[in-house]
C-alpha cells in the first residue's frame, strides 16, 4: 500500500516518513498542498493520504476536497493531520470528505491502528470495484466494464489516428453442451475458452465476456489484416484440443467476426458491425472468421 504524506514541517514529515517506512509502507512525500495535488492526479496515486491541515497555499482540507472531486483511479483514504487547536474544526474536515484524523504529535500505536483501518477500507473498495467489473465465472471483464474501457480505447485510437480491431467470438453449438452434458460441463467450457482466448493475445488487449457464450476482444494498434490472422489463431486455439469437462471431453469450435475502427465510428456501432460479421460466420457454416472489409479503409 502506497501512502502520501503531505506536511510542510520538515521534522514532522521526516518522522512520519521514517515510521511508515519502518512498517513496510511505500511512502511518497509532499512539502505542500500543491505537491500533494500533483501526486494525487497520477493514475497510480497512493491509496492512503495523510494530509497536514495547515499548509501554505493549498491546505489539507482543500486537497481532500480535490481528491473527492475526482472519482477516477480508485478510492483514497484520507487522514487529516491536525494540531490540537484545529481539532474543534474537525467537522469541516469530515465535511470535506476526510475519513479520519490524527493529532500532532502523533502516538505511534494509534497511528499504526488508524493506518491499518485505512488499508482495510481501501482494499475492500478495490475488491468491490473488481467484483463489479468482472464476470465471476471466467474472470474476464463483464459486458458493462468491457464497453466502458472499449469506448475509451475507441476515442484514443481516433485521437492518435491508430487502428483498433474488435473481434467477437461465439462458441458454436454451445447450447447443446448445456443440454446434453449439463451446466457444470458448460461452465467448464466457458472457463477454459476464456483462458485460451486470453492467453492468445497481448496483456494490453482487452478481453471480455459479452454474453452467454460470446466473447469480445479489443486489440489496440491492430489492423484488420492482423486482426483476421489473430482471429484464425483464436479459432484454432478453441478447436485444437478437446475441452476436459465433468461431462467428458468435448470438441468445440468458435465463429469469429472482425472489424476495425473507421472514421467517427462509435463503440456501439463497432460492436454492432462485429456482431453482424459474426452472424455471417455462423450463417456460412460456423468455425470460421469473417471480417467486415467495409471497415478496412480506416
Ligand atoms: Mg503545517
Image (cartoon, rainbow, N blue to C red):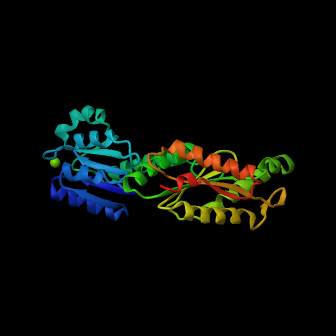
Q: Is residue 256 left or right of residue 207?
A: right
Residue at 66% x, 64% y: name it.
232
The foreground one among 258 and 142 is 258
Q: Is residue 14 left or right of residue 125?
A: left
Tell me, yes or no, if residue 202 can be seen here: yes
Where's residue 124, x and y in %?
48, 47
Which residue, as the protein is rendered here, is positioned at the far right?
A: 180
Image label count:
0
Residue 291 figure quarter: bottom right
Q: Is residue 214 left or right of residue 73?
A: right
Residue 272 figure quarter: top right
Vertical comparison of 248 with 86: above or below: below
Residue at 16% x, 46% y: name it.
55
The foreground one among 172 and 161 is 161
The foreground one among 49 and 142 is 142
Tell me, yes or no, if residue 124 can be seen here: no
Where's residue 179, x and y in %?
84, 46
Where's residue 57, x and y in %?
13, 45
Vertical comparison of 237 with 34: above or below: below
Residue at 19% x, 43% y: name it.
59
Q: Is residue 130 left or right of residue 64?
A: right
Where's residue 216, x and y in %?
60, 52
The foreground one among 179 and 150 is 150
Which residue, as the protein is rendered here, is positioned at the far left?
A: 56
* The N terminus - image quarter: bottom left
Amino acid at each position: 500500500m502506497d501512502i502520501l504524506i503531505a506536511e510542510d514541517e520538515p521534522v514532522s514529515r521526516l518522522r512520519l516518513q521514517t515510521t511508515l517506512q519502518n512498517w513496510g509502507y511505500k511512502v511518497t512525500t509532499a512539502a505542500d498542498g500543491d505537491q500533494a495535488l500533483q501526486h494525487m492526479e497520477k493514475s497510480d496515486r497512493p491509496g492512503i493520504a495523510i494530509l497536514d491541515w495547515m499548509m501554505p497555499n493549498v491546505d489539507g482540507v482543500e486537497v481532500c476536497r480535490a481528491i473527492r472531486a475526482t472519482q477516477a483511479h480508485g478510492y483514497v483514504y484520507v487522514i487529516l493531520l491536525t494540531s490540537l487547536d484545529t481539532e474543534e474544526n474537525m467537522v469541516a474536515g469530515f465535511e470535506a470528505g476526510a475519513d479520519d484524523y490524527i493529532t500532532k504529535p502523533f502516538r505511534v500505536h494509534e497511528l499504526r491502528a488508524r493506518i491499518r483501518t485505512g488499508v482495510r477500507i481501501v482494499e475492500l473498495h478495490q475488491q468491490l470495484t473488481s467484483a463489479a467489473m468482472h464476470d465471476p465465472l471466467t474472470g474476464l471483464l463483464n459486458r458493462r466494464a468491457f464497453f466502458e474501457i472499449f469506448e475509451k480505447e475507441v476515442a484514443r485510437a481516433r485521437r492518435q489516428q491508430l487502428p483498433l480491431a474488435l473481434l467477437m467470438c461465439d462458441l458454436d453449438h454451445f447450447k447443446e453442451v448445456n443440454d446434453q452434458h449439463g451446466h457444470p460441463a458448460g461452465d467448464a467450457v466457458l472457463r477454459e475458452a476464456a483462458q485460451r482466448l486470453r492467453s492468445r493475445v497481448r496483456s494490453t488487449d482487452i478481453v471480455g465476456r459479452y454474453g452467454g457464450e460470446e466473447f469480445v476482444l479489443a486489440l489496440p494498434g491492430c489492423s484488420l489484416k492482423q486482426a483476421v490472422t489473430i482471429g484464425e489463431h483464436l479459432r484454432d486455439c478453441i478447436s485444437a484440443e478437446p475441452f476436459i469437462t465433468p461431462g467428458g471431453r468435448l470438441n468445440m469450435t468458435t465463429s469469429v467476426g472482425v472489424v476495425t475502427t473507421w472514421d467517427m465510428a462509435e463503440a456501439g456501432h463497432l460492436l454492432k458491425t462485429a456482431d453482424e460479421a459474426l452472424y455471417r460466420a455462423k450463417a456460412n457454416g460456423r468455425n470460421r472468421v469473417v471480417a467486415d472489409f467495409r471497415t478496412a479503409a480506416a
